[in-house]
Amino acid sequence: MRIAGIDSIDQANAWLPYFIERHNARFAVPPSDARDAHVPYPGADDRQLRHILAKHYPRKLSKNLTCQFHSTLLQIQPPASGGAGLRGAAVTILEHFDQSREVFWRTALLPHTIVHKSRAARTGAHASQRSDQDAANLAPAAQPSLENHPHRKTKPGVHRKTMNAEPTGHFYFAANRTFLLCLDSVLTLGCALSMPSKTSWRTRR
């Protein structure tokens, strides 16, 4: 088109038949069979083409002849001879553009129904009572007060039964020139547990 000086759409449309004639004369190859292989479209009643253009979803049937599909449950209607042979069978669900669906097992079309799970609606006082009960169940349980718990008054290494007794004891002068109070009557266990030995803490003279 540049060589021909074409710079507008009208000129290009007028030049196009001349270009096609020259192109076919140069590159065309005679066909081995001159018959037209195009098949006319029969319309929307063509089931084979309808199945080809549909979306295919593989599924597996349960023992009850049901399968899950897009948050719905499909129930297969068993044939008159019984549906024992369909338990665990691999089926294909075809979803068409009009949102209709078909279930095929091999080449057989299986009639089916949609199972809707019933849910009891909560209305009125029952709903409010149920919501209050759910909130109470989710609330954390109140913890008992630990102020008077015996373990909070017990010192490490001392039995809680002897805490009310009046302790007696004496001092030892440690090696690092610090005083260590050791209680003889009540806190002997605590002293023994906290210190390796009394003699090891006495000052050697």
Image (cartoon, grey):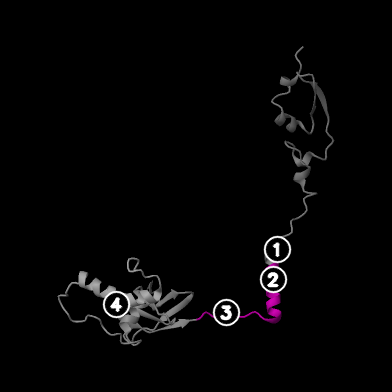
Q: Distance between the residues labelled 3 and 4?
A: 69 Å
- Front one among 14 and 185: 14
Q: What stretch is highlighted in magenta?
A: 116-135
Q: Distance between the residues labelled 2 and 4?
A: 82 Å
Point 71% across, 80% down: residue:
125
Instruction: Indicate the quadrant containing the N terminus: top left, top right, bottom left or bottom right.
Output: bottom left
State yes or no: discs 1 and 2 in contact (Cβ < 8 Å).
no
Query: On the image, numbered disc 1 is attached to which residue?
Result: 139
Amino acid type at mark 1 = Ala
Left of 164 or right of it: where is 159?
Answer: left
Residue 150, position as x, y percentages in the image: 77, 46
Answer with mark 1 or mark 2, whichever residue precedes in sequence.
2
Amino acid type at mark 4 = Pro
Residue 191 counted in the magenta span: no
Answer with mark 1 or mark 3, whichever residue precedes in sequence.
3
In the rendered image, the vertical position of residue 188 relative to residue 200, given as above or below: below
Asked if one can make out residue 83 in the rendered structure from this viewpoint, the answer is no
Q: Where is residue 171, by image quadrant?
A: top right
Residue 128 counted in the magenta span: yes
* Disc number placed over residue 17 in the picture, else none: 4
Query: On the image, numbered disc 3 is attached to which residue?
Result: 119
Q: Where is residue 47, by image quadrant?
A: bottom left
Residue that protrudes farthest toward the top in the picture: 205
Answer with mark 2 or mark 3, whichever residue precedes in sequence.
3
Tell me the mark number nearer the camera, choosing from 4 and 1: 4
